[in-house]
Amino acid sequence: MLKDLKLELDDSSVILHMDYSENFSIALQDEIQSAYFNRKQLSLFTAVAYIGQLNTVSFAILSDDTKH
């Protein structure tokens, strides 16, 4: 279905395909061992924008809301 939509896409249209990827734990390079249990988390979403027939842009979105 996405393949068919991309084939019919004109230059004034965009298809945005997003998906939840994972919760990501933030870690400092030289953190002490006790910091392991207090790491903050972010939700990571990946996305691709199909712009017209020829342009594709990939990107990631970070959110501090980890409830899903």
Image (spheres, rainbow, N blue to C red):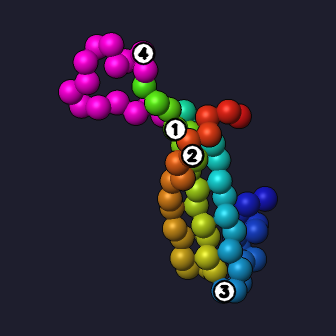
Front residue of 5 and 18: 18
Circle 1 residue: 42
Question: What amino acid is at disc 2?
Answer: Ser
Rendered image quadrant of residue 9: bottom right
Q: Residue at x 42, y 25 (%)?
A: 39
Q: Quadrant of the N terminus?
A: bottom right
Circle 3 residue: 11
Q: Secondary structure at mark 3?
A: loop
Q: Quadrant of the C terminus?
A: top right
Please report whichever mark, 2 or 1, sits nearer to the chain's N-terminal start.
1
Q: Which residues lie in the magenta part?
A: 24-38
Q: Nearer the viewer, mark 3 or mark 4?
A: 4
Front residue of 35 and 42: 35
Circle 4 residue: 37
Q: Callout 1: 10 Å neighbours few (<14), some, many (20+)?
A: some
Circle 2 residue: 63
- Residue 46 versus residue 15 in the image, above or below: above
Where residue 11 appears, as percent x and y from the top left, is 66, 86
Please report whichever mark, 1 or 4, sits nearer to the chain's N-terminal start.
4
Asked if residue 27 is among those painted magenta in the image, a careful observer would answer: yes
